[in-house]
Every structure is written in structure tokens, then in C-alpha cells.
Amino acid sequence: MRPPSITALLTGTLLAAAALPGSALSAQEVREGTLLATDPLLGDDSGRVADSYEVEIEAGRFVTMALRSGEFDAFLRVVSPAGVVFENDDGDGTDSELEFLAVESGVWTVHATGFSEDDFGSYTLTWSTDAASGDVQTVTGRLSSLSPKGQPYDSVMVDLGAGTVVFQLTNGADAYLTLLAEGPDGRRQDVYPEPGTTRLTFRGATAGTWALWVAAEEGAAAQNLAYSLSAVVVDGSPAEVIEGRLESTDPRLPLGEFADRLEIEVDGEGPVVIDLASDDFDTFLVVETAGGAPIVKRNDDAEGGGIAMSSVEFTAAEVAGRTGTWTVWVTSFGRDQTGDWTLRISR
């Protein structure tokens, strides 16, 4: 039986800053503070102190937050109006970073705290939002089916337009849920399960029908567990697709890997993401920017894509001053590997 399509429930709207003196955040804001031993406790029996901020968000905003400190191990915790918790400890070094799709309208609470009860010192909290290009589509369901291995699962189908697609899975328990998605072009990707909230991003996807599976790691103990799954197209720019094949007649790298060398033109100022995928070999991707100070990035296994996918990402700051002709090497992890490959360039 074909699962029902997700129906559009929420529409992206503009952010309104909360009128809460001394604690309100607004879009594109930077807030500096200091964690002190005399600050209020976080309230989760951890013994940690926290500075709390409140912000009013309307559904449909894509939110990015970061808590940075050179004096303590930062821990960022955000709670939705309905009590759904988003949290992160491991960002860059001792920093914490969060990206999530707001599927609820109302006042959200942001806690700036440390990893342990002895973490004190100065910090910087940054915040920004972006509107999605399409409506947020949300479905609630339960893990009502059992796989032959006894793992509870559920599946849904959703029709989405072209662009960068974000799926966000939440549940009210601490269960570890795996989210797997298969796009209209046959690309499959999953994400390492985390308790509470999991997010999966496909860049430059084509328009069409997606198949999604939600499964529990815990086995039958999570049977009938409720979840909420949201989907949105963050931008409407489909990827540029280049297809090719590694052949035994291609040039070899020093350790015996076959390689295809491509040149692409990068003229914009925004970020660039390049993905390499193959069903035939273990991919390896190398990209070199143009300009007087080129950047070289390499990747073997993309997160969530396994050995069949490699991915590199250049931020807008890294692209600036390095536009022009970029060099892309499509090759394999091991020697003597051949087969078809697909390169996707999202700008």
C-alpha cells in the first residue's frame, strides 16, 4: 500500500523579535555574555548554570545558532513552545552549533550553558534565520510496523519541488530514530540517529516524489512510538548534474587509481557544494578553487552517504576572490576501480 502524502500545514513567515527587555533575540543578532557561578541553574538536574534568552519565531524559518567560548566547553540548548528540545555540545572545538527548521510558531527558549557544572566564563551567542522557498509540510505518525528483524518502522511519501531539501524528524522521547530518504533521482541517504531530533539535507535535488522511512534502533521497545516529520525546500535551485565513467583507459594517479579531470566555472559569490556519487566504486573527490590563493578540499566518505558518496563544501567567504575556473578530480579510494559516476554542483 502506498503511504499517504504529507499535507502542507505551515507556511514560512517573517520573524518577529520578542519584546522581552534584556533577554530577547532578533534575527541576525550577536549577543555576548558571561556564565557565572551565581547564574540560575539550567533546571535539568545537571547542576549546570545557564543564561536564558527568549525569541519569538513563526513556523517556516530555518534557524542557525552558535554558542562560542574560549573559556569553557559550550553547550547550546533550544526548547520549542511545545517543549521539543534541540541541543548540541560538539561544534568546532569547544563550540556548539545548531541548525533546525522551526515548525512551531511562538516563543522559543535558548539556553547558553556549559557541558559540565564547573563551566564558567565569557561566550558569544550568534543567531540568524532564513525563510524557506516553499511551504513546510509536516506529518505525525507512529512506528506501527515491524521489520523482519523486529525493528519498528513507518514510511511516508512526499512530493517536493527542486532545490535544497531539508527533512527534520522529532520525537518526544529519548529514542534513537534513523531517517532514510530516497529522492526522485534515486539518491538514498540516511543520518546517524540522535535522540529527540534528527535532520537530513539533500542539496540540489530534482522535483518529484520522495520515499522516507523512520526506524528505531531500540527494537520492539519503541513500537508505536510517535514522531513528527517535516519537509521543506530551503531554496529552489536545482543542482547542475555532470555524468561520466571511470575507465581503465583513463589517466592513473600515483597509487594506481583511475581519474577524470574536469573544469567548472564558478562566478557567483555564494557557497558551493559538490557531491560525487557512484553505484560502482568507492568514490573520492578532490576540488581546487581558482585565484591567487586556491583552496584544495578532499573527501572520501560523505556523512550519511557512505562509501558511495563524497562531498566537499565551500562557504561564501571561501568562494570570494577565488571565482573562475575550478579543477575537479573524480577518482576512487582504491586502485583499478571503474564505473559510472554522477557529479552534482549546488550553488
Image: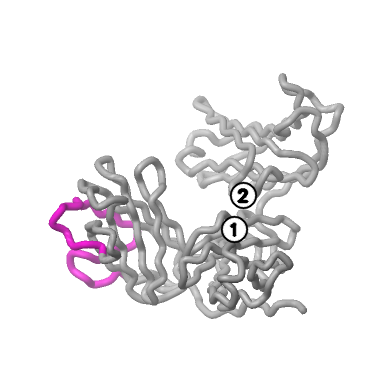
Locate residue 148, reporting x and y percent. 73, 67
Q: At x 24% / y 58%, what residue is drawn?
A: 47
Q: Is residue 91 above or below residue 106?
A: above
Question: What colour scheme governs how the chains and residues are painted in the rendered image of this protein?
Answer: one colour
Locate residue 253, reporting x and y percent. 73, 23
Residues shaded magenta: 16-42
Q: Which residue is mark 2?
A: 346
Residue 24 lies within the magenta run: yes
Residue 309 lies within the magenta run: no
Tell whether 59 sits left or right of 235.
left
Q: At x 40% / y 54%, what residue is drawn?
A: 88
Locate residue 98, reporting x and y percent. 42, 56
Q: Is residue 139 something that shows in the picture?
A: no
Tell whether 18 sits left or right of 61.
left
Q: Is residue 46 above or below residue 313?
A: below
Image quarter in which the N terminus is found: bottom right
Q: How far apart are labels 1 and 2 at the CA level?
A: 8 Å
Q: At x 68% / y 72%, what residue is drawn?
A: 146
Between 198 and 202, the residue placed more toward the observer is 198
Kind of residue indicated by mark 1? Thr
Locate residue 173, reporting x and y percent. 46, 70
Q: Are marks 1 and 2 in contact (CB under 8 Å)?
A: yes
Q: Main secondary structure of the magenta part?
A: loop
Q: Secondary structure at mark 2?
A: strand
Between 240 and 229, the residue placed more toward the observer is 229
Between 200 and 171, the residue placed more toward the observer is 171
Q: Which residue is mark 1?
A: 164
